[in-house]
Image (cartoon, rainbow, N blue to C red):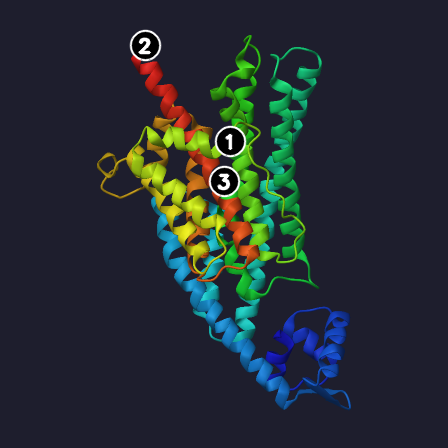
């Protein structure tokens, strides 16, 4: 498509000339031109390449697609930047991501849009590399826990939990690697329009992965060292919920952007039914939260028109409502939600890694639900992605609400 739009602007004197103009390797451009010629979209006269009338129509369609994508990016940027800034989550990488998005929305020239998209793709690769660095460290740390279990130094019952933790961590790494490869591929690069799907994950995934690693390390000193702790529901949730939620989060992105993905298996929690556990905890906040949760999952189980949108709206509002109840507006300072992470950290017994996990997951999921909300008729890939997002949301809710129960129990003693 980019070659057609470039040839629409001006014919190419040679393959080398065109390759230089679009910033691609000559063999790749040559192969692409051959395919376009077979489709009747370009023609060659001597060494010069020109676009045909059919190619002009295709180029016009591509121009409209890129312009629509730029408009969508602009809307996404409008909602993304203030939310991240208000939460105090803007770091150097996040700022670079937003700047790359901004360049996509501020240019009209097709070639410059393509260049901005390429820069944005590079930022995505950086995000995946940072996330994978944390996840491989977490995997190495988990191996030490497994070794301790094999030596009989952990409490009975820990092996099944560690196995579930390992599976979720491996899934998170596998899907991150797949997305990184998809982003890096020059022959199967994501269309510019699909790059918008990466905005939430590119900003949030490194922090989510880092917090999952940190939470595992925080628990290492206490897990299984006290007799019977391995069977504690609270301990099980604290150990399993973060990696399961993280794995479901990454899986939802992969299902969104890779329609032909074979990665359709979404692991549920290696606990008793997570939906029952979440609803029991939500009941302590009010029956309205339980009804919202039930309604979301009921909508996700249907295949009718608007079912994806209805489920996404319900789950997003549930997540927002729970955080608003736990961290009321009046507890925030005059700058809005800039102190949310600090409030969540205080709520989670001053756990820095817990606050990082909860706030970054909440932000990422909020953005993903916004994306699904745009669909009025979701296909099966959308529904699979939605269900993965909902499992991730259940993981965040389980983790946060279990802390609430533990805190209330501690206060009453």
Tag 1 residue:
273
* Residue visible at 24% across and 34% down in the picture: 331
Tag 2 residue:
413
Mark 2 or mark 3, which has the lower sequence index?
A: 3
Question: On residue 349, which mark appears?
Answer: none
Name the secondary structure under disc 1.
Answer: loop
Res 57 quadrant in image? bottom right
Residue 372 can be seen in this image: yes
Res 405 quadrant in image? top left
Q: In whole angstroms, how far apart are the C-alphas of marks 3 and 1?
A: 14 Å
* Residue visible at 58% across and 41% down in the picture: 131
Res 289 quadrant in image? top left
Residue 272 in picture, x, y percent from top left:
52, 27
Name the secondary structure under disc 3.
Answer: helix
Name the secondary structure under disc 2.
Answer: loop
> From this viewpoint, which residue is outermost toward the top?
227
Residue 30 in picture, x, y percent from top left:
76, 75
* Number of numbered discs: 3
Relative depth, front residue between 164 and 283: 283
Q: In this view, does 160 lie to the left or right of 86?
A: right
Residue 130 in picture, x, y percent from top left:
59, 42
Mark 1 or mark 2, which has the lower sequence index?
A: 1
Residue 307 in picture, x, y percent from top left:
44, 55
Mark 3 or mark 1, which has the lower sequence index?
A: 1
Dot 1 alpha-carbon crowd within 10 angstroms: few under 14, some 14 to 19, many 20 or more: few
Question: On residue 392, which mark appears?
Answer: 3
* Residue visible at 59% across and 42% down in the picture: 266
């Amino acid at each position: 498509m980019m070659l057609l739009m470039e040839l629409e602007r001006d014919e190419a004197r040679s393959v080398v000339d065109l390759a230089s103009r679009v910033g691609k390797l000559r063999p790749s451009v040559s192969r692409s031109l051959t395919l376009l010629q077979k489709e009747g979209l370009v023609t060659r006269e001597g060494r010069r390449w020109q676009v045909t009338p059919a190619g002009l129509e295709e180029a016009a369609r591509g121009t409209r697609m890129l312009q629509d994508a730029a408009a969508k990016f602009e809307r996404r940027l409008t909602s993304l930047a203030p939310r991240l800034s208000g939460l105090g989550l803007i770091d150097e990488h996040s700022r670079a991501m937003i700047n790359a998005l901004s360049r996509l929305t501020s240019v009209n020239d097709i070639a410059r849009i393509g260049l901005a998209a390429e820069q944005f793709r590079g930022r995505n690769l950086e995000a995946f590399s940072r996330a994978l660095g944390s996840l491989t460290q977490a995997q190495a740390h988990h191996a030490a826990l497994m070794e301790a279990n094999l030596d009989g130094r952990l409490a009975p019952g820990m092996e099944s939990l560690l196995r579930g933790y390992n599976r979720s961590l491996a899934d998170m790494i596998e899907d991150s690697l797949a997305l990184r490869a998809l982003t890096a591929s020059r022959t199967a690069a994501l269309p510019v329009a699909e790059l918008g799907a990466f905005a939430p994950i590119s900003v949030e995934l490194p922090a989510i992965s880092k917090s999952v690693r940190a939470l595992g390390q925080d628990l290492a000193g206490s897990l299984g060292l006290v007799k019977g702790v391995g069977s504690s529901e609270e301990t099980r949730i604290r150990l399993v919920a973060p990696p399961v939620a993280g794995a479901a989060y990454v899986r939802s992105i992969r299902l969104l952007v890779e329609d032909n993905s074979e990665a359709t298996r979404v692991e549920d929690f290696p606990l008793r039914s997570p939906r029952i556990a979440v609803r029991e905890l939500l009941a302590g906040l009010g029956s309205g939260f339980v009804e919202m949760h039930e309604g979301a999952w009921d909508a996700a189980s249907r295949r009718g028109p608007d079912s994806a949108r209805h489920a996404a709206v319900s789950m997003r509002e549930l997540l927002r409502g729970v955080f608003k109840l736990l961290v009321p507006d009046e507890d925030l300072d005059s700058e809005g939600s800039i102190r949310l992470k600090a409030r969540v950290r205080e709520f989670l017994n001053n756990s820095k890694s817990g606050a990082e996990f909860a706030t970054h997951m909440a932000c990422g999921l909020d953005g993903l639900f916004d994306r699904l909300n745009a669909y009025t008729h979701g296909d099966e890939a959308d529904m699979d992605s939605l269900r993965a997002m909902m499992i991730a949301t259940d993981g965040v809710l389980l983790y946060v609400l279990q802390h609430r129960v533990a805190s209330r129990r501690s206060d009453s003693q």
